[in-house]
């Protein structure tokens, strides 16, 4: 499986855009794009930041509001790396490939620098979502009891459940 590559030269600029937008959303309380209409100055600035983010990443689907309060769950570098990853496309992975991917995600078995591990794991969870059609696929791995499995279910049980529930 090919690891997602990002343009490292864009990382600092993406971090700046996200940090600026997140701070502005926190200061103004403008958490949703529909709220931007009520505050023209802050709304205009957020719209401009979203446009910049989309241009630098090449991803027209990115929403600047997705990065609001990122600090409550991850680091600025991780969200910037995630923004720089291109969305995965479904390629029709086999059950063996999916099984290997689930194992790698659960064991954090990716040969990447430590500062890229979380973003790489997030990317491959997204790959797994695209391939299986399951929006909550990470919950199968980290919270198997939500899907009728034992809290301490083994990887084989979790994998079998994901494959059984997948929509392909």
Image (cartoon, rainbow, N blue to C red):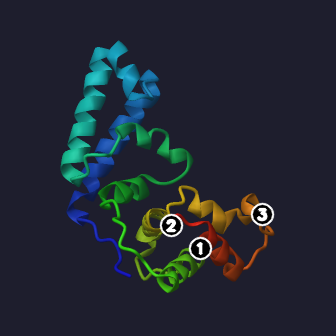
Q: CA distance from mark 3 to mark 1?
A: 14 Å
Q: Nearer the viewer, residue 89 or 113?
A: 89
Q: Which mark is residue 148?
A: 3
Q: Residue furthest top?
A: 38
Residue 63 placement, left or right of 105? left
At which x and y percent is residue 56?
Answer: 20, 51
What residue is shown at x 41% (from left), y 69% (from top)? 116
Please give the count of numbered marks on the rendered protein: 3
In the picture, the quarter occupied by the N terminus is bottom left
Q: Which mark is residue 77?
A: none
Badge 2 crowding class, 10 Å Cα cut-off, few under 14, some 14 to 19, many 20 or more, is many
Does 16 appear above or below 151? above
- Residue 38: quarter of image: top left
Q: CA distance from mark 1 to mark 2?
A: 7 Å
Asked if residue 49 shows in the view, the reply is yes
Q: Which mark is residue 163?
A: 1
Disc nearer the start of the sequence (3/2) = 2
At which x and y percent is residue 127?
Answer: 43, 67
Q: Which mark is residue 132?
A: 2
Q: Nearer the viewer, residue 21 or 64?
A: 64
Does 123 appear above or below 2? above
What residue is shown at x 76% (from left), y 74% (from top)? 153
Disc nearer the start of the sequence (1/2) = 2
Disc nearer the start of the sequence (3/1) = 3
Asked if residue 115 shows in the view, the reply is no
- Dot 2 lies on which element? helix
């Amino acid at each position: 499986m090919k690891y997602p590559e990002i343009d490292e030269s864009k990382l600092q600029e993406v971090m700046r855009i996200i940090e600026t937008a997140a701070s502005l959303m926190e200061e103004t309380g403008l958490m949703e794009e529909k709220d931007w209409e009520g505050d023209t100055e802050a709304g205009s600035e957020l719209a401009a930041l979203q446009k910049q983010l989309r241009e630098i990443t090449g991803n027209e689907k990115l929403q600047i509001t997705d990065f609001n309060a990122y600090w409550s769950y991850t680091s600025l570098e991780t969200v910037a790396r995630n923004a720089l990853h291109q969305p995965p496309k479904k390629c029709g992975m086999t059950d063996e490939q999916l099984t290997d991917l689930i194992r790698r995600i659960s064991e954090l078995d990716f040969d990447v620098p430590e500062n890229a591990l979380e973003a790489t794991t997030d990317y491959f969870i997204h790959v797994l979502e695209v391939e299986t059609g399951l929006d909550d696929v990470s919950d199968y791995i980290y919270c198997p009891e939500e899907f009728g499995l034992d809290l301490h279910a083994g990887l084989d049980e979790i994998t079998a459940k994901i494959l059984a529930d997948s929509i392909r």
